[in-house]
Amino acid sequence: MDGQAGPSGAVSSQSSSSAKGKGDRKVAVTAERVSKIFGSGADEVRAVDDVSVAIRQNEFFTLLGPSGCGKTTLLRLVAGFEHPTRGRILLDEQDISSLPPYKRPVNTVFQSYALFPHLTVAGNISFGLEMLGRPKAEIERTVDEMLKLVRMSELKNRRTSQISGGQQQRVALARALAPRPKVLLLDEPLSALDLKLRKEMQIELKRLQHETGITFVFVTHDQEEALTMSDRVAVMSKGKVLQIGSPRDIYDRPAERFVANFIGDTNFLEGSLESSANGQASIRLQQYGAVIKAALPEGKVPSGRVSVVVRPEHAALVADPTKGTMRGRLENIVYFGTDTHYHLRLVDGHEFIIRQQNRRGAIEGLATGAEAGIVIPDDAAQVLRD
Amino acid sequence: MALAQDVAESVVPAEIGESQAERVAREADARDVRNRWWLSAPAIVIISAASIGPLLIVVLYSFLAPGDYGNVKWQFSTDAWYNVILQRDIFDDSLQWADAHLSIFWRSAKLSLWTTFLTLVFGVPTAYFIATRPEKTRNLWLFLITIPFWSNLLIRTIAVMELLRAEGAINNLLVGLDVVDQPIQLMFTDFAIAFGMVYVFLPLMVLPVYASIEKMDFRLVEAGYDLYANRWQVFWRVTLPIIKPGIIAGSILVFIPSLGAYVTPRVLGGGKNLMIGNLIELQFGQGRNWPLGAALSFTLMVIVLLALMYYVRIAGGQQSRQGHA
Amino acid sequence: MLDMLLGRRGFSVKKLPGFATVALFVFVVLYAPIMILVVYSFNEGTNPSIWQGFSLRWYEAAWSNSQVQEAALRSIFIAVIAASIATVAATMAALATTRTKSFRGMTFIYSYINMPLMVPEIVSAVALLIFFATIKINTGYTGIGYLLAAHTAFCIPFAYLPIRARLESMDLSLERAAADLYATPWKTFQRVTLPLMWPGIIAGLMLAFVVSLDDVVITEFVKSAGQETLPTFMLGQLRRVVTPEMYAIATAFLAVSIVMVSFFFFINRTRT
């Protein structure tokens, strides 16, 4: 279900990121060949394994991956709660790898919020400013400003235990934003909220990032969240960054099997590379006899046998089996309201799923057991790097 | 590497081995651990000087000869250890069983086991009762069991004494109801000691058992009923095995102070029904045999440590089994 | 009848027949002797168990008894000093053994501090008697320092446990959050850790105070002549005829303990 909202959401976030322009901005945070190894010998765990990332100023950058992929460790390396075993962390081109957290101009929104239970909402927000020794008047002004920014002004003097989860989330945000950090780190901040609140906070976070112009580094395991909110996403697995790109890049042009699998639903096809030019390739799908056009991944060009991915909504279904790129037997038709999923069995036994938007009137002649044609348009397929 | 395009142009190949950041972090860690030892130092020093350290001297003293007016003579002797269970006959100098000591050991063991058993019988239902109260009243019941737990042991023993005395509440009641003509002798009996120990040590059983019942998932009990078990079958086959760690903890917590009890047998047992604790005290008073007192103390401590180790093994096994589930 | 009293109806999976009866019996037996003691402390007559009317004469007698006064003051003096020192040492040790990844020796420190709880009281008492006797012979000092040292030592684990529990229950990310917000380690301690651990420290202090106040066995063995505390004084009096004056002292003593324990219970249960 998660996968369905993904593509539509990605479209909306695309407009905001393209409006800001890409690539020409300065780099805020750089991880240079960073490794973090916990334990040693047989118990050695490479939480972060030779990762290099450059996060640009003012961007909403997301680290996406399953739990244990190293995304939180990478965030903690930037915050200063961990120190890299190898490599360096740069902030504005300065090496901050050995600075303690309290000397780094970055702030964190913790997964558990970590609001100080003995302080009021205002006390929490002013904490960082007090530690920085800012004048009283400035602190008061900033606190009020922050409260207004997160729309919490009326709860200023409440205890943090007396406010709801969503409100605690806002206080945590305001507290981290108050010292105007160069980078705001967010460690799965929405995971404790229920679905409705989470949606609200997603929009709220985008607004805050827009209004403050601060670089956001956001950690999540929720692909939908990553696609809807980010300017760029880094997909991580087993301590490595597999792919970095805009949500649309990541979704439409996954370069790795893991990325294709982790984000959205995917059909995998095997074939051999016939020819390639300008990032486009012709792939012969041996078992089905067809030749399709597919985009090549960036970097090294694979050759010989390749894997190709096709998103379920990028393929189309036709009732006449001879009219398609290839054919399959319909095994299951699942109606979802906005669209319908068709599960087909290919000749080699693999499953192929097609997702079609519902219109008034169903496609004629489609019933389980029937043969149907699968149409793969030229821009639908992507070759994987492996 | 896959993202060459994203890495800043000026990438220097990272040095192999420890980074500067990690060296700084490691040094900070080492400093942190040193500071933690310094912080613990006052507590460790005080406990060494006035609690654990002196225990070593007990061992030393048990191998010396008794002084004429208490204390010790500084000469090596193993007599004290023989005397724990043996004694030399006054007339023919042969070694015999020290019947007086053995009977005291026997009474201590017997009374401690009875106390443990009775606190179990009364404590488990009490703990179960408290743990199954609604949220609001549960804390009140818990509070009611905590008060005696932290109240003065001597005063609670005096309260029991008042109850058991010849003119005490029980006898007054029995005589008043014509159950007996004469007040019955309750004080200065083994019964009085056992009653007193059950009374003062009961909270030590209830609290750990309560803690494990409170943690228990009552859906397991529901599952038991669902699978046709009746109340007692559910209790014996589901509840009891789950709360076993609490029961073992409670039993150890009751058994250990019972075995070493001093105040309760002294007040309720009078001069004649001694337990190990009183026997030890005697060696430092009228007995004037410090080495024997030291040997007896050490023996008691070893028994207690064995009981604790047995508990740790069982509790540890229990824990690892739960870890696998 | 009992069920009605406890407001239960229908099939309850938690109910076990007879358990409530046993529990209520236990509570009655637990409190009846104490109640009798308290009631008879207000008895007019000299015989402690024949009611002859309400009176405060035994409280007056105890209050004006110089031996009682002296013992009570000494008890309080020892408890205040021992509990304070023990709480400071325990707080430091608790800070050292929590909120960090386990380091070499941490388990040792933890177990060592708890070790006095494992040793039977009578054994500790004997050990201290022997140890202090040696020092007394060699230095000639017979002051109250021995009692203070002994009490401080056995109070430490009692102070340590609630403080440590409090620290353990605190969210580790709070200190991280403070560090993230530019607080140096010392500022973090001052502004976050210390204010949050206060309830634990107070609870530890009170437990230590009650434990010191209650101690009979170790004090009985360690005290020099003329160093009676209230409990050892009472223990000594039990050899003679028991008068309601004892009950009056016991009741007052009990009241102090109950107040302290209530406070402890309350603090321990409030989560800030």
Image (cartoon, coloured by chain):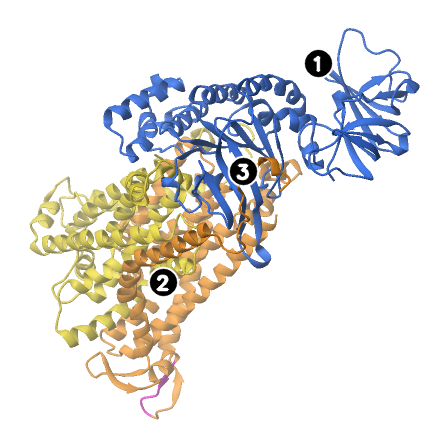
Chain colours: A blue, B orange, C yellow
Disc 3 residue type (three-letter) = Ala
**Quick check: is B233 in the magenta stretch?**
no
Determine the chain carrying the residue at label 3. Answer: B
The percent position of residue B44, horizontal first and vertical second, equals: 31, 61
**Quick check: is B87 in the magenta stretch?**
yes
- Furthest residue toward top: A360
Give whichever of discs 2 and 3 has the lower sequence position. Answer: 3
Q: Identify the magenta region.
A: B86-91
Q: Residues within 10 Å of mark 3 (few under 14, many from 20)?
A: some
Determine the secondary structure under disc 2.
helix
The percent position of residue B60, horizontal first and vertical second, equals: 31, 78
Determine the secondary structure under disc 3.
loop
Disc 1 residue type (three-letter) = Thr
Residue holding disc 3: B8
Q: Is residue B266 above or below residue A129?
A: below
What separation in Å lies between label 1 and label 3 (alpha carbons)? 44 Å
Q: Residues within 10 Å of mark 1 (few under 14, many from 20)?
A: few
Instruction: Inspect this view and state whether residue B186 appears.
Output: no
Residue holding disc 2: B190
**What residue do we see at 36% from left, 75% from top?**
B101
The percent position of residue C262, horizontal first and vertical second, equals: 28, 40
Q: Is residue B302 left or right of residue C71?
A: right
Find out whether the residues at labels 2 and 1 contact each other: C-beta distance under 8 Å: no
Disc 2 residue type (three-letter) = Asp
